[in-house]
Image (cartoon, rainbow, N blue to C red):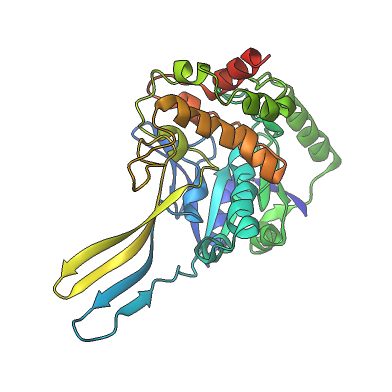
Amino acid sequence: MEKILNKKHIDDWIAALDSWDILGPVLEDGIWAYQPVSGAVRLDHPNTRQSPKGLAFPQREIFFKFEQIKGEAPRLTQVVPDEQRHAVFGVRPCDGRGVPRMDLVFTDHVEDNYYQARRKNVAYVGLACNKPPGPNCFCLSVGGSPVSTDGLDVQMTDLGDRYFVKAVTETGKGLMTAAGKLFAEPSAADQKQVEQVHADAVAHPQRAVRNVEAVPAKLKASFKSPLWQELARACIGCGICTFLCPTCHCFDINDEVQSKAPLKGIRVRTWDNCQFPDFTMHSSGHNPRENTGARLRQRVAHKFQYFPENFGMPQCTGCGRCVSECPVGIDIVAVVNKVVENAG
């Protein structure tokens, strides 16, 4: 399904989706973030600071509550994700490509009921990139595209005073059908224009991970290289790189005691981070990744070696957030290229 939507009707479309919670890019204190919107939605945004992955994989999620009263059997109460549907507008293609990668981990690789319960109620309305890329974008070199539809339910392309709107999935068709009268059929000129917009977007030069197909073998050969410690020397272990990543999915599970008499608490899943010093700490005190070099190696190898070995594709989508937001300037593109270059 391909349609034309006049820009003045975007808010009417959102109003028609009355059974969905709508999120869109909002600029607040100089930071773009996905937040609930009920009226006007701005779609003139660069990429947001954080990806929308938290809708299906929240940063903090309660699995169940527990209570132990002396002399009685423990009481467990499961906390089930709500059934509210969420439609996220303005998702950029690099974040869209993060969705099937998260799905591979939490639906194909293992069956994570909590992720699946949330994921089925999230729809992604994407916006193709039609402006020159940011200084740290590199989606093309990891198999993506500024006009990719991967992971999206709907793709929108800005044509000036109107959007070219394409349903990618059945969920996307449903979103468009809910406001069918607002959409018009695209003309031949519209089709030609969107093809040109897409071609121009792909033609914009970007940064690049060089020869990405050869990277897994090169990384494997460089496992013991002293270069890792050199490249990670500035790292402060803040973890911002993975917390902002659209595909990082490591987590920890903890029991949090809320009272002791009677004993009450919750079991919680929270995001974890391979750049934290205690991420792989054993109960014995041994840490197989005891320094920043080993931890940087893990992050890079997960993206460009382990994930390709397991799933046949890079885990990285080239959004560039980890480069742009790193407080000490560690650059994953430069790191990969440097390690590969030195691997011979």
Above or below, comparing residue 235 to residue 92 in the picture: above
Above or below, comparing residue 37 to residue 95 in the picture: below
Q: Nearer the viewer, residue 24 or 253?
A: 253
Give the residue furthest to the left.
261
Instruction: Identify the image quadrant of the C terminus.
Output: top right
> Is 165 placed left or right of 291 in the picture?
right
Where in the figure is residue 248, as x and y percent of width and height?
51, 42
Where in the figure is residue 298, as x and y percent of width and height?
51, 33
Above or below, comparing residue 289 to residue 248 in the picture: above
Q: Nearer the viewer, residue 14 or 106?
A: 106
Q: Nearer the viewer, residue 56 or 212?
A: 212
- How many labels were placed on the picture? 0
Where in the figure is residue 81, as x and y percent of width and height?
45, 67
Residue 94 in sight from this viewpoint:
yes
**Which residue is found at the position 20% from the left and 65% from the top?**
258
Residue 46 in sight from this viewpoint:
no
Where in the figure is residue 290, as x and y percent of width and height?
39, 31
Give the residue furthest to the bottom.
72
Q: Quadrant of residue 122?
A: bottom right
Q: Nearer the viewer, residue 332 or 53?
A: 332
Instruction: Identify the image quadrant of the N terminus.
Output: bottom right
> Is 187 placed left or right of 72 in the picture?
right
**Which residue is found at the position 47% from the left and 51% from the top?**
54
Give the residue furthest to the front.
284
